[in-house]
Amino acid sequence: MQADFYIQCKGISIGYKDRSTTSVVVKKDISLHANRGEMVALIGGNGIGKSTLLKTIAGFMPPLAGELLVRNRPLSGFPAVELAQEMSFVSTDIVRVANLTVRELVGLGRFPYTNWFGQLTDNDQMIIDRAILLTGLTGFENRPINRISDGERQRAMIARALAQDTRVMVLDEPTAFLDISNKYEIVRILHQLVLEQDKCIIFSTHDLNTSLTMADRIWLMLEDRVVEGIPEEMASSGYFEALFPNNQHLSFDLEKDDFRIKKEIYGKVNLVASGEKLIMAKKALERLGFEVFPNLPVTQSLSPSVSPSSIPSVPPSLYLEIIQQPEGWNIVCQGITQYVTTLEELCRSIKNISTQQGS
Amino acid sequence: MKLFRNSTIGFVLLMGVLVFLFLLDLLSGSVHISLYQSISTLFHSSSSDPQIAAILFQFRIPKAITAVLAGAALSVAGLQMQTIFRNPVAGPDILGISSGASLGVALFVLSAGWVYGGTPLFSLAGSWSIVLAAWFGAGLMMFLVVILASRLRDLMTVLILGILISGAIMAIVSVMQYFSSESTLKSFIVWTMGSLGSTTRDQLWVLVPSVAAGLLIALVSAKFLDAFLLGENYAKSMGMNIRLAYLLTFASTSILAGSITAFCGPIGFVGIIVPHLARKLFHSPLHSKLIPATMLMGAIVMVVGDLISQLPGYATTLPINSVTSLLGIPVVVWIIFQHKKIGAI
């Protein structure tokens, strides 16, 4: 089946033009595409050129080389109004116009369709109503946009783009500065728009987890190249490790779809427990820098260097056994057993042990 | 303050206030004219006292009309500048547009001395030449400010920039005065003392069409200005022709601020404060509403300023610029404090 290309970048270079002669190339040889009915997440480190790429696609700055096609037509060939009917844009700028109501803001999205005086027809009003409904802003229509929360304002900006009634929507970090609940709400709205209206939505984000679980396609900007693919392939390809090449403390966790901070390993633990307690204690111990091996045979080892042969021996070789009791935990370290009642106390004791061992 | 929820009522009310103040302005002055006398003179000019008719037709009506025009023009120029620079303290005087107009006039008047040996200042052709010179000067300054100030979102930086630009222009004008002859210098000084009352009936034939043209351009660019509220990038992404939009506001502000400066001299602060009053009263940032509101409010504020400047009971009038400055500066300080928190218009 032939894919319905909405955006195609064919070996484009992006960057700024300083005066007419010199140009600063931010990134070159970018070949990407986005199809109809796709949600595309653009991922990359800070300062790698995500905004520049999005601004280039939105037509604010021309590509310095290569070909940029919007629905199989060169972007540069679009008259301004026609492009505005194909593609809308939501930037990171916070718009704080006093007294501008949500409805008036959304109404501005009708700009490419209204007459010289910007009069809204009944059809325009209907489209505005729909945009407000889809972004869950019903009831907020008459609130001024500088008196609503960041999440609501971001939804209002999306509603404005929606009122522009375009096939392609480009959003620059729509979830930045938002709390988790608002972040998910924004991504959910975008996802719904893709599913129900067959739009092509391209957004940049730092939130790997949401993009890998919700996006149809990932554009990944690395130091030396730009790659794309479906989320599952991208995650297993090892590209994400290349995202932050200079940071040894990060590792990509394929199962959790996210990065984790690598911790220094202080020692190993044989954790004898079950059920919820096992899960909680395992997490706590991992947080404290221990490798956890659940439910091995208890050896009550007398020396820190002696650990069961089933555990691979990795230095440092602090070895503990923690055994769940009916009311609390037994910590066995170098033959000495310590009893604690709560998980919090357990953590404190473990910390003490690892500090002593360290010194 | 949401005074006018229904904007039609607001417009009608303001219009009424303006008509009332306009009539009051006709009645006030050093020579006492009663309401009955003025109405009978206005409508049966043949049967009335020729002296009163002369005062009304030669002085008071032109002055009141000039006040209305000046208020509307400067305020609408200020509104457009605040929108395109997205800065609440932008205005034709603060950003040096009025100074630019003065520079244009100075260049014209002082150089006319060398070219013609005299100044054709008070003829109709002279009026048009002065207005053109003012437009040119204002436009040039607007161009400079657009290049500099559009990159500065910060309120204080723009204020400092305006002070610097005005300072530079004053310096240039002083240097020119130093090198000009006595007679041309005199006509320039007379011009700088210009006031609402110095506009003659003949000059109104230049001022009225100029201001009307400027206001008309502002009205037809309301949609562009609305898009500018969200910033240039959003405006572009909605398909706005940025160049046309800039050109229109450019032309409108230069014509409006230039024409008024050419005939009335510099009048400060009206251009900054009136748009804020209009926003407060009409509770909307959209220009289809805001431009007419600003026009009416500006006219009202200027007629009030003119009434105050006549100092009831005294034969002399205060310079209008002093009145607007004394009234305007506290309001500007208030605007600055308000926007420290909010950030933008």
Image (spheres, coloured by chain):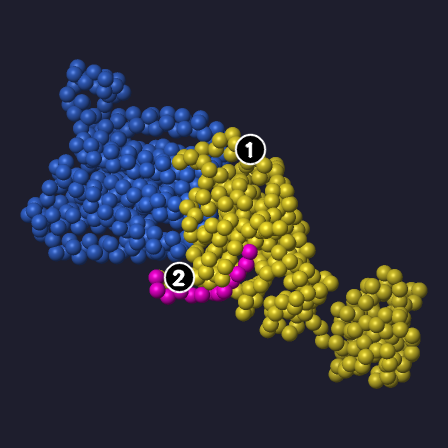
Query: In the image, residue B269 lies at what x, y percent?
Result: 34, 44
Which mark is drawn over residue A38?
none
> In the depicted view, which residue is nearer to us: B316 or B86?
B86
A239 horizontally vs A116: left or right: right
Which residue appears at 19% of the width and 55% of the height?
Answer: B174
Chain assigned blue: B
Asked which secondary structure carries label 2, the reply is strand
**Residue that label 2 marks:** A17
Q: Tell me which label, 2 or 1, sits earlier in the chain.
A: 2
The type of residue carrying mark 1 is: Met
Asked which secondary structure carries label 1, the reply is helix
Which residue appears at 84% of the width and 83% of the height?
Answer: A304
User: B242 above or below B39?
Assistant: below
Which corner quadrant of the image does residue A356 belong to? bottom right
Is residue B80 one of those drawn in magenta? no
Disc 2 with disc 1 on a shared chain: yes
A346 horizontally vs A145: left or right: right
| Span of residues in magenta | A20-33
Magenta: predominant secondary structure element?
Answer: strand
Tell me if mark 2 has few (under 14), some (14-19) or many (20+) residues whose alpha carbon lies within 10 angstroms of its own.
Answer: some
Q: Residue furthest front?
A: A1
**Chain ID at mark 2:** A
Is residue A23 one of those drawn in magenta? yes
> In the depicted view, which residue is nearer to us: B343 or A115?
A115
Which mark is drawn over residue A126?
1
**Disc 2/disc 1 C-alpha distance (Å):** 41 Å
Chain assigned yellow: A
User: A355 above or below B10?
Assistant: below
> In the depicted view, which residue is nearer to us: B243 or B64?
B243
Query: In the image, residue A294 lies at what x, y percent?
Result: 86, 70
